[in-house]
């Protein structure tokens, strides 16, 4: 990942987080020290262009795309690295997410859009209003797009801006109402353009997923395709999703290194968080929190479980010790040494859970657990 993006994005985010935490009270010395950060920030953003290589060519059918069927029981061919862009019908704010796409026909796909994510919220708004939701399904293009699409960003932060940061330059965008109401990423390789109609569901799946088992067949919305565009000499990216660790292991670790400096900014009681990709990322995470008074660590744990995609965490290990969170053995031992199993294991049942988690009684339903090990080591 560092070969692809270098050290600059990580250092830039570290500087942003440090600035937010230490700029007050502002002084001339502090402001002068930020001059290089300001110059870097000027390179981040969107750049309007008049031409878009992605619109140069078209295809007549989704079957012309080199989609793959990864596992024997998969329900069909899938786009495994789709970059799905939608906008809120209410606010116009955009979201770039990665929701698996099953090919249903020559001009129709499944849309595994989940209510816990930004795109799912947009579809909820559109369906409630009885409107089709415009959608762009990209593949390829600048590598930063793929990373940004799976980043656990707050709803207020644009994935396109993060992609620009990773690129080290402004992301080229073309706007053309004759083509689409949505912005067009000029340098992507493929664009499947269409709408997600309200009140239509079709069976989607099974699919060999990143938790290491098959996600089952369920009814999901569809995307009705209007046009398929691609640039000259386009490259079709794909990945095999399955039992971890797979390729997404490195993406998950890079994203955590990139975004971890921001967690203490938005959650002051939290000093660090790490999710273990070997479990499928959302299944298991650990955090270092502050424990300045009795119960503060528990409050910090609840704050984590209420933050964006971190809310999908299944099991959260919590400590106030200065451990290396990337070292699971060290972290787990530290928690166990300071935990009373009678009072420090907290189970939350009958709550919303990740769509891909099949340990609960039904889709999107399940339970969570907090293992709280703070303070001095317990004596037996």
Image (cartoon, rainbow, N blue to C red):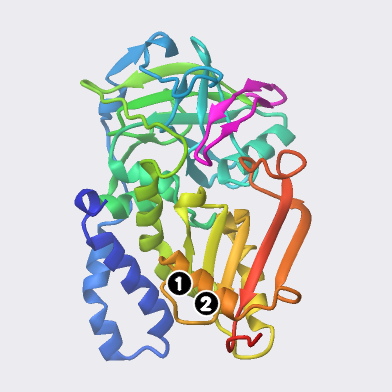
Image check: 3 left or right of 360?
left
Residue at 68 percent across and 88 percent down: it is 294
- Which residues fall within the magenta stretch? 197-219
- Please state, as top left, top right, bottom left or bottom right, where the C terminus lies in the image: bottom right
Q: Is residue 103 above or below residue 291?
A: above
Magenta run includes residue 215:
yes
Query: Dot 2: few (<14), some (14–19), or many (≥20) neighbours within 10 Å?
Result: many
Query: Dot 1: few (<14), some (14–19), or many (≥20) neighbours within 10 Å?
Result: few
Residue at 39 percent across and 41 percent down: it is 246
Image check: 346 left or right of 21?
right
Occupied quadrant, residue 55: top left
| Circle 1 residue | 330
Front in this rendered view, residue 11 or 246 = 246
Magenta run includes residue 234:
no
Occupied quadrant, residue 109: top right
| Circle 2 residue | 334
Image check: 277 left or right of 376?
left
């Amino acid at each position: 990942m560092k070969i692809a993006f270098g050290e600059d994005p990580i250092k830039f985010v570290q500087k942003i987080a440090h600035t937010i935490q230490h700029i007050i009270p502002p002084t001339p010395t502090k402001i002068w020290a930020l001059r290089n950060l300001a110059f870097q920030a000027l390179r981040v953003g969107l750049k309007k262009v008049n031409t878009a290589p992605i619109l140069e060519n078209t295809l007549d059918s989704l079957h012309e795309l080199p989609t793959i069927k990864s596992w024997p029981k998969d329900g069909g061919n899938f786009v495994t690295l789709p970059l799905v862009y939608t906008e809120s019908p209410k606010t116009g704010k955009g979201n770039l997410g990665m929701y698996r796409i099953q090919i249903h026909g020559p001009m129709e796909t499944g849309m595994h859009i989940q209510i816990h994510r930004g795109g799912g919220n947009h579809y909820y708004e559109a369906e409630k209003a009885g409107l089709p939701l415009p959608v762009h399904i990209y593949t390829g293009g600048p590598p930063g797009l793929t990373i940004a699409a799976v980043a656990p960003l707050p709803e207020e932060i644009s994935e396109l801006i993060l992609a620009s940061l990773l690129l080290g330059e402004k992301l080229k965008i073309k706007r053309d109402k004759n083509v689409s109401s949505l912005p067009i990423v000029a340098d992507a390789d493929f664009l499947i353009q269409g709408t997600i109609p309200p009140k239509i569901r079709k069976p989607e799946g099974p699919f060999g997923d990143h938790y290491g088992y098959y996600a089952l067949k369920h009814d999901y919305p569809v995307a009705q395709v209007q046009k398929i565009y691609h640039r000259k000499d386009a490259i079709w990216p794909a990945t095999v999703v399955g039992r971890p660790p797979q390729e997404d292991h490195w993406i998950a670790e890079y994203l955590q290194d990139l975004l971890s400096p921001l967690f203490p900014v938005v959650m002051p009681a939290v000093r660090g968080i790490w999710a273990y990709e070997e479990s499928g990322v959302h299944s298991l995470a650990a955090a270092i929190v502050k424990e300045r008074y009795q119960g503060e660590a528990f409050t910090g744990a609840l704050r984590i479980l209420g933050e964006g995609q971190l809310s999908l965490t299944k099991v959260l290990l919590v400590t106030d010790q200065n451990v290396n969170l990337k070292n699971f053995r060290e972290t787990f031992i530290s928690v166990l040494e300071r935990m009373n199993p009678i009072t420090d294991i907290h189970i939350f049942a009958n709550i919303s859970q990740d769509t891909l988690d099949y340990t609960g009684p039904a889709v999107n339903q399940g339970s969570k657990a907090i293992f709280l090990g703070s303070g001095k080591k317990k004596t037996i």
